[in-house]
Image: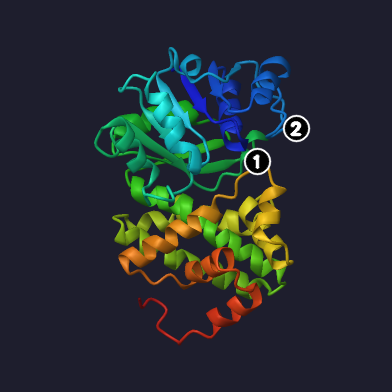
Amino acid sequence: MKPAVIGAGNWGTAIANLLGKKNIRVKIWARETEVVEGINRRKLNPLFLANVALSENISAYHDLSETAEGCNMVIMATPSQFYRDTLEKLVRVLPGNVPIISAVKGIEEDSLMLISQVTADIRKQPEGERFAVLSGPTFAEEVAAGKPTAAVIASKDKNLAGDARKLLSTDYFRLYLNSDIIGVQLGGALKNIFAIASGIIAGLDLGLNTQAALISRGNAEMTRLAVKLGADPKTLSGLAGVGDLILTATGSLSRNRTLGMRLARGESLEDIKSTTLTVAEGIRTTLAAFKLARKTKTDMPIVEALHGVLYESKPVRETVKLLMGRPLKDEFGE
């Protein structure tokens, strides 16, 4: 296998290093020239996972043509907002039969498309053809440190899923197969919304009871929307759903949770964004989920509340009070 990783942020770098440590020669594409130079000259990524010594088997490129040359599997690890533009450029130099594994956790903001749908649109292929998605509770820093991790590879093509699992599996990175690409993608994207909300709860010091309620009700909202969009509800109770939600909503390494904590402490969203190098996907995903909920007539009160905080400058404490004051209802009712 000759893999190429497109995107050299935390997650893309961790994936490339995982492959390199398996003695697989891997190419990685980076937007930033200093990242390319750092990886090739010093085997360090100066901007992302800067404390991780990288494998000698990793070669970095700034040119997509050079990155794609000779590769027979592509792992996309760009932020969702850059996915379409990057893939449009990549497919010009990538044969149509080369499979794409998405390690992206987001929804395209303007079109409301999932990454599988964007990929199909660009490659002019049916959704899911030569496509798989990698998702689950995976902090890049912990994968890079070799800590035991379980995740999911989802594809409509069992052979492709098996090939991807064989490529990526190690004695510390365990992968389960799933055919539900819709549910796995939505779990990975939507959990970032509730991680921001969880950070707000932590920042306001509202306690563990509130945190547990947020995670439980957040998973209910995720599942409602995912099922309406064609997902299997079981997926949202697995690693790519509630597993990833728990990690991102409670873990100190979560960018989205940290964002919520800073909002609760009175910082403005613009100030937070201006001082952060990495992308908190939950900001854009909140807007996309808000629009999808309206479009599908799905009840998502936490999403609606967070949309008010992020996009309508509503105060966080008043938003929590409004959520708690909603009409009482059955737990599993719509």
Q: Nearer the viewer, residue 258 or 288?
A: 288
**With 208 as the anchor, is 65 left or right in this view?**
left
- The image quadrant that residue 204 belongs to is bottom right
Label 2 packing within 10 angstroms: few (<14), some (14-19), many (20+) = few
SS at circle 1: helix
Label 1 packing within 10 angstroms: few (<14), some (14-19), many (20+) = few
Q: Which mark is residue 142?
A: 1
Q: Which residue is mark 2?
A: 51
Please say if 151 is above or below 34: below
Is residue 315 at all visible to an observer of this figure?
yes
At 53% from the left and 18% from the top, the residue drawn is 63
Position of residue 298 measured from the top left corner of the image (x, y, whole percent): 35, 69
Split into 4 quadrants, where in the image is the C terminus?
bottom left
Number of the front mark, 1 or 2? 2
Position of residue 210 measured from the top left corner of the image (x, y, whole percent): 61, 74
Gap in Å between the C-alphas at discs 1 and 2? 12 Å
Q: Give the amino acid type for the residue marked by disc 2 in the picture.
A: Asn
SS at circle 2: loop
Across the whole image, how many numbered discs are drawn on residues? 2
Q: Which mark is residue 200?
A: none
